Amino acid sequence: MTGPRQTDYRVAIVGGGVIGLYTAYRLARAGAGRIVVLDRGSYLSNGASGRNGGGVRQQWETPETIRLAREAVEAYRRFGSEFGVNPWFRQSGYLFLADSPAEVERLQAVHRTVTQEGLPSQWLTPERVARLVPGLSTTGILGASYLESDGTLYPFPVVWGLFEAVQNLGVEVCLGTEVYRIAARDDRRLSVDGAHGRLDADIVVNAAGGWSSEVARRAGVDLPTRPVRHEICATEPLKPFLDPMVVRASDGLYFSQTMRGELVGGISVPHPEGLGPGMTTSAGFLVRYARAVLGLYPALRDLRVLRAWSGYYDESPDGLPILGADPSLPGLVHAAGFGGHGFMLAPAIGRLVAAAALGERTAELAPFAPGRFANPSAPVRNREKLSLG
Ligand SMILES: Cc1cc2nc3c(=O)[nH]c(=O)nc-3n(C[C@H](O)[C@H](O)[C@H](O)COP(=O)(O)OP(=O)(O)OC[C@H]3O[C@@H](n4cnc5c(N)ncnc54)[C@H](O)[C@@H]3O)c2cc1C
């Protein structure tokens, strides 16, 4: 454990994943004062930030998510020069396959929204899909949406680049420091009790990923996020054969080829909500994933899986992130509810959460305000549904 050096901070961030670290970076760059990041893991990236598929896309159902993703793509393009670490961001496209009239309708709506947002989305016929991805079976495919500037990156260099950058800016990052309790200390400050002992902070940011509702409970507030386990795997490497990330939203299938040659991907498998039974994998997932990939790519039948694992999506009721000040505990700021796409939004989220922590009022935060769920009897419309895996 690396404990905090002080007992007084302007901002304490609970969670040292990509969201907590990007927020710390933006705050430190804004000269926010003393900042500490507390993570209970004994190593960096023990949460979803070290367990994801590295997909970065701007094809979404809502303009709100598209705008966050678009800003993030620009940030990841300059990540190497800004942080001195190469995240191997490869913009080789995302291809969403439609395999029913309902999926055609849904993905054409996505295509129109993305186009209206000024991005050069394309609607492809099955023939164009076959030309774009040689070897892919287009049997049953009715069309596809495609955006070339989407892509993939390696999550670990991003987390490590941020970790080094924030430390160089004076931020303390403490590992092995679980937070047990957050409470109002007086009418201005919060106290944070944990494995480190106690510290005080003006602002506490809840950036605990799949544990965000649990951390909220430890602060005595309700946050309507829920952790849902998702599985993923990587195969042995092959020569480069696949450019875009291939997605079939109808069953949550996705796979891409990394620059090391591995095929990395997953598929939806129903898991009970909640934390447990751990971040392992299941035979059922591997069978389902293998059948789905081989249905589209029969030539991969001898490919062997090298590693499989899982992590938690932190789901919000309407599919949009929950960002900003908690309505009932002054000083507590949430950065939660990122589903299967927090990594690709992180640069934009970090900027917005830092603004919220500094008390800036920006219209950009309005659609993500925690208070939107304050009335439990008001119906919640699921707005952003294009989550995968
Ligand atoms: C299988 C899988 C595939 C995914 N694929 C993609 C993808 O392709 N693209 C994409 O953009 N996103 C993807 N995601 C989602 C993405 O990984 C997450 O949205 C993102 O990493 C969330 O970052 P975070 O910092 O909020 O959470 P995390 O990285 O989970 O960090 C939260 C941290 O909080 C710490 N913590 C929890 N409780 C406490 C406590 N009480 N005290 C102290 N610390 C605590 C944890 O130790 C953890 O390190 C995927 C996720 C999974 C599981």
Image: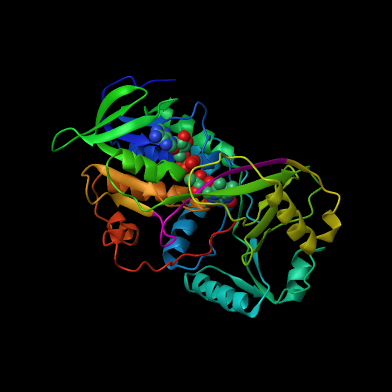
Q: Position of residue 366 (x, y in %)?
A: 30, 60
Q: How many marks?
A: 0
Residue at point 26%, 38% (across, down): 203
What is the quadrant of the C terminus in the image? Answer: bottom right
Query: Residue 336: within the magenta?
Result: no
Q: Main secondary structure of the magenta part?
A: strand
Q: Is residue 360 left or right of residue 2?
A: left
Q: Answer whether residue 312 is magenta in the image.
A: yes
Q: Position of residue 356 (x, y in %)?
A: 29, 48
Q: Residue at x 40, y 38 (%)?
A: 25
- Along the viewing direction, whichever of 319 and 59 lies nearer the viewer: 319
Q: Give coordinates of residue 133: x percent, y percent.
A: 76, 63
The span picked out in magenta is: 307-321
Q: Residue at x 27, y 57 (%)?
A: 371
Does residue 76 appear anywhere in the picture?
no
Lateral position of residue 9 relative to residue 254, left or right: left
Rendered view: 214 above or below 111: above
Task: Specify how the rendered protein is coloured.
Answer: rainbow
Tell me the quarter of the image containing the N terminus: top left
